Amino acid sequence: MAEDSPLIRSLRSALEAAPADVPLRLHLAALLLDDGEFEQAVAEIAAALQHDPGSAEARKLMLRAMGAPAPPAAPPAPAAAPPGAEPPPEAASVSFDWASAEQQLSDTVQPRFIEPAAADGADDPGDEPAWDIESSQVRLADVGGMTEVKQRLEAAFLAPMRNPELRRLYGKSLRGGLLLYGPPGCGKTFIARAVAGELGAKFLSVSLSDILDMYIGQSERNLHDVFAAARANAPCVIFLDEIDAVGGKRSSMRHNAMRGTVNQLLLELDGAQHDNDGVFVLAATNSPWDVDTALRRPGRLDRTLLVLPPDQQARESVLRYHLRDRPIEGVDLVKLAKKTDGWSGADLAHLCETAAEAALLDSAASGKVRMIGMPDLLAAAKEVRPSIESWFTAARNVAMFANDGGTYDDLLAFLKRTRRL
């Protein structure tokens, strides 16, 4: 075997000290070929080609290793043929299938060229992000209770869109968007998905992290790309979550970068450079008083909808949803919904989690699995505190002292009705 040859062992030792020595490696490959060790020879030739891709000697040895005849050496220039003599036949050309060779050596040698998709490196700040555009299957009928919210949505947003003939007859414009506001955890995102489902439109949800970028001007480009993706997939509902973070008041901003983002959002909403037909903008915020006033002018987010904590029927639906896959018995949803008046949907989900945790710990301690019952849920209702009262405290001051133009009349009426004033 060639591996037992002292000369080959010496050459291998020398290559360990100088792995980039191409002539030495090719000499070893030639000896391996002479001894019939073709696979080892190919590996050495491939390593040589990595260091010197244009080596003619390496190519010649590769042809030999792959079973093709080596190209003949260039013959000396022939003497002038005598008059009338026929010219000598041309030497047969030898071709080598480098694509097949690369495929056979893929485990040993990297490809000569790397495809752009396979390139490894940091993301280019100019790369266009891919936006996750969904097809919403949620309908308003899936939203439990909240009858007043549904009626307002129907009147201010859905009815004109469903009746294009009447819209044209009365000159009703679809320009502008809808601003959903209210305490956190009350289902603003779910309602936005339901609107997209009612319209049979695509749904594109955008948050602050999707927009902001460390590179100057990239945040504006990201925002433009969002609207471009929505226009390409129209009809499409763009849902801008936490709009006060993306479109906050420019007068209170210290950084010009954020001002540029707000300006770009205004430009996209106006549709001055592009046609926004079929693009419906819904935005949500817990702090509408922090949204730039220019965003709420006619033609932009000019319609406002207050999303309040779920009513009795909605609370029953939320509780049923969060208990549906848990082992329960004897649960009175009506009684439980009455005891959780003023709770948000997130609070109700936490209530069910707390009750399930108590039953789980009890089962682990006793060694006997038991069901979740009303005692667990009522005990959890005493332990969990609703999380939205702090929001009403802040909203009360705005509704009483900063209700310019009746913007917060709905909020003011709710505060009076619930005796929070």
Image (spheres, rainbow, N blue to C red):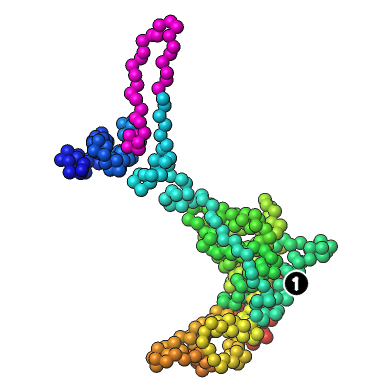
Camera-side residue: 67 or 301? 67
User: Main SS type for the magenta part?
Assistant: loop
In percent of the image, x 67 and y 72: which residue is there?
139
State whether residue 4 appears in this view. yes
The quadrant holding residue 14 is top left
Q: Secondary structure at mark 1?
A: helix
Three-letter amino acid code at disc 1?
A: Ala
User: Looking at the picture, how far across and down is residue 201, in whole percent?
Assistant: 67, 64
Q: Which residue is mark 1?
A: 155
User: Looking at the picture, how far across and down is residue 74, in whole percent?
Assistant: 35, 21
Which quarter of the figure is the N terminus placed in? top left
User: Looking at the picture, how far across and down is residue 253, in whole percent?
Assistant: 54, 61
User: Looking at the picture, how far across and down is residue 58, in whole percent?
Assistant: 32, 34
State whether residue 12 appears in this view. no
Camera-side residue: 229 or 370? 370
Q: Is residue 345 above or below residue 210?
A: below
The quadrant holding residue 411 is bottom right
Left/right placement of residue 242 relative to residue 407 reads: left
Q: Residues within 10 Å of mark 1 (few under 14, many from 20)?
A: few
In percent of the image, x 52 and y 84: which residue is there?
326
The stretch of residues the image draws in magenta is 63-91
Q: Is residue 298 above or below residue 91?
A: below
Q: Is residue 125 above or below residue 324?
A: above
Task: Report if residue 86 lies within the magenta region.
Answer: yes
Task: Report if residue 403 lies within the magenta region.
Answer: no
